[in-house]
Amino acid sequence: MEITHSIGYILAIFVGITLGLVGSGGSILSVPILVYVMGVEPILATAYSLFIVGTTALFGGFQKAKQKLVDFKKVVLFGIPTILAVFVTRKILVPSIPDVVFSTPSFTLHKSVLIMVVFAIVMIAASVRMIKPLKEKITNNDKLNYISIFLQGLFIGLVAGFVGAGGGFLIIPALLFLAKTPMKMAVGTSLFIVSAQSLIGFIGDIRPDQNIEWNALLIFTTCSIIGVFIGSYLSKKIEGEKLKTGFGWFVLAMGIYIIIKEIILK
């Protein structure tokens, strides 16, 4: 086993911890780990990430359900449009993008770089909303805007499918601000939505020409599942608002790092 793979498996535990703590962030960690640590090609890394995050989130979701921290009505409301969008995106949109998206004599934009940069921009945008303190108390009794939730679900699925993310970093803000869900309930609800759309997205992504290293993928996923149980335990001891703000700063830092890595340091 290569040393880089061993490091990647150790870091996979933190992928699960992040999911268990805040119901998102698995892809924010898994894609950079797969690309920059384990040397997986970015397009394939996004497919791996969907499987890893989807499977890990499913285990975490059952843990939250036992604690009565899952709103299954909102799982369905967000889940249907996000699953449809992520499947179509991985099956049709992503494969249709050429390897060289744009080229001039002095600059060439490759598909892999485009995906990583879009990933980073979305992370930064989501982080700003997460860092801002809530202006009003969120309760489950507030009236829901079903049209906004459906449209947001389509957008989340499109973005998540494009960058190979579970979409939790977008689902959490949507649950907080559109669906009026308390933070700890949003975490558990997000895990089930992330799991469904990620695994469906992975199925839509499987193609005959893909060379999937199942052994490495399953080991990484197992380590991540161990982490989600650790994160779920830690979440019982940390205040929900602190989780939201802390995760926002983390997402911001990772987004800036990816842009520097892909554009400035190339």
Image: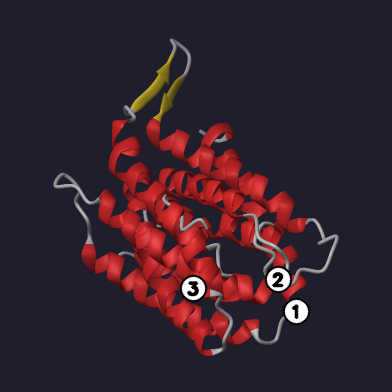
Farthest residue in the right direction?
Answer: 135
Q: Secondary structure at mark 1?
A: loop
Residues packed near mark 2 inside 10 Å, few (<14), some (14 to 19) or many (20 plus): some
Give the residue displayed 41% in from the left and 50% down from the top.
Answer: 164
Give the residue displayed 31% in from the left and 64% down from the top.
Answer: 2
Q: CA distance from mark 1 to mark 2?
A: 6 Å
Image spot of residue 170 (x, y percent): 58, 54
For the rendered model, the colour scheme is secondary structure
Residues packed near mark 3 inside 10 Å, few (<14), some (14 to 19) or many (20 plus): many
Which mark is in front, 2 or 3?
A: 2
Q: Secondary structure at mark 3?
A: helix
Residues packed near mark 1 inside 10 Å, few (<14), some (14 to 19) or many (20 plus): few
Q: Is residue 61 left or right of residue 4?
A: right
Q: Earlier in the sequence, mark 2 or mark 3?
A: 3
Relative to 235, does residue 164 appear above or below in the rendering?
Answer: above
Are the residues tagged 1 and 2 within 8 Å (C-beta)? Answer: yes
Relative to 32, does residue 74 appear above or below in the rendering?
Answer: below
Farthest residue in the left direction?
Answer: 208
Q: CA distance from mark 2 to mark 3?
A: 15 Å
Q: Which mark is residue 239?
A: 1
Image spot of residue 251 (x, y percent): 64, 55
Quarter holding residue 90: top left
Q: Nearer the viewer, residue 248 or 66?
A: 66
In the picture of the structure, the residue carrying the numbered disc 3 is 16
Farthest residue in the top direction?
Answer: 105
Q: Nearer the viewer, residue 21 or 257?
A: 21
Q: Which mark is residue 243?
A: 2
Image spot of residue 51 (x, y percent): 34, 62
Looking at the image, can residue 40 be seen?
no
Q: Amino acid at mark 2?
A: Leu
Q: CA distance from mark 3 to mark 1?
A: 19 Å
Q: Amino acid at mark 3?
A: Gly
